[in-house]
Image: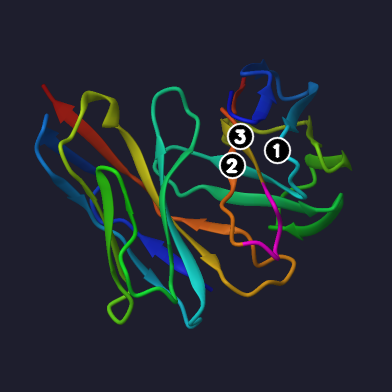
Amino acid sequence: ETGVTQTPRHLVMGMTNKKSLKCEQHLGHNAMYWYKQSAKKPLELMFVYNFKEQTENNSVPSRFSPECPNSSHLFLHLHTLQPEDSALYLCASSHGPNSNQPQHFGDGTRLSIL
Amino acid sequence: AQTVTQSQPEMSVQEAETVTLSCTYDTSESDYYLFWYKQPPSRQMILVIRQEAYKQQNATENRFSVNFQKAAKSFSLKISDSQLGDAAMYFCAYRSGISNFGNEKLTFGTGTRLTIIP
């Protein structure tokens, strides 16, 4: 039990499809994050939410649309993706900016774009 | 902007031996945190150890310890008595110590793949 649960674990979709990734944390954290992990590249931060408010958008294309309805849930809505978007998408949570506690990660969603 | 560099894409070590993974970083801040995360084939990023920059004492967690050289901006991870379960990708990460929204993000290195030889 990681405390941060991501679904689905694997996703294959065409470029014209619309799908969503889901992340749920059971740790009572206030901040949630989306990262993209591509082969041989550092993890790239995509979005940060603190207390449901987006505080960081790291120049992510609009075909990725995050949603944070509450501090425990985070979604990443996908539409008209490109082949270069194939990657592992990791969700993380933490207590937030006023804490020195580390981020906790989920197992990720492996996304493949056909 | 902060950067984190891991110059060893791959490392291998004999089981029960000791191995050291390198990490350097660049920052103009004086207050920050450094982390080592482990990512096994199961993909979950697991925190291995962390270091507060204001602490001079090197952090240790059982078989894992760090050599934190603040002036040199170096943060290496030493794994003692290596075990088969230590095989994974290891990522070094930096986080600002300034408590503002947006500063809690992690900056990662490219990772080092560690293989344990039985």
Q: Nearer the viewer, mark 2 or mark 3?
A: 2
| Residue type, label 1 | Leu
Are circles 2 and 1 on residues that touch, CB within 8 Å?
A: yes
**Image coords of residue B77 (percent x, y):** 27, 53
Residue with the mark numbered 2:
A104
Depth order, front residue of B1/A93: A93
**Image coords of residue B75 (percent x, y):** 31, 64
**Badge 1: chain ID:** A
First in residue order: circle 3 vs circle 1: 1
Say what secondary structure mark 3 lies in.
Answer: strand
Depth order, front residue of B10/B32: B32
Q: Are marks 3 and 1 on the same chain?
A: yes
**Which residue is pictured at 51% across the width and 47% down the height?**
A43
**Badge 3: chain ID:** A
**Which residue is pictured at 58% across the width and 28% down the height?**
A2
Residue with the mark numbered 3:
A89
Residue A43: which disc?
none
**Image coords of residue B47 (percent x, y):** 46, 43
Magenta span: A94-99
**Badge 2: chain ID:** A
Distance CA(mark 2)–CA(mark 1): 9 Å
| Residue type, label 3 | Tyr
Say what secondary structure mark 2 lies in.
Answer: strand
**Which residue is pictured at 48% across the width and 82% down the height?**
B30
Residue with the mark numbered 1:
A27
Q: Are marks 2 and 1 on the same chain?
A: yes
| Residue type, label 2 | His
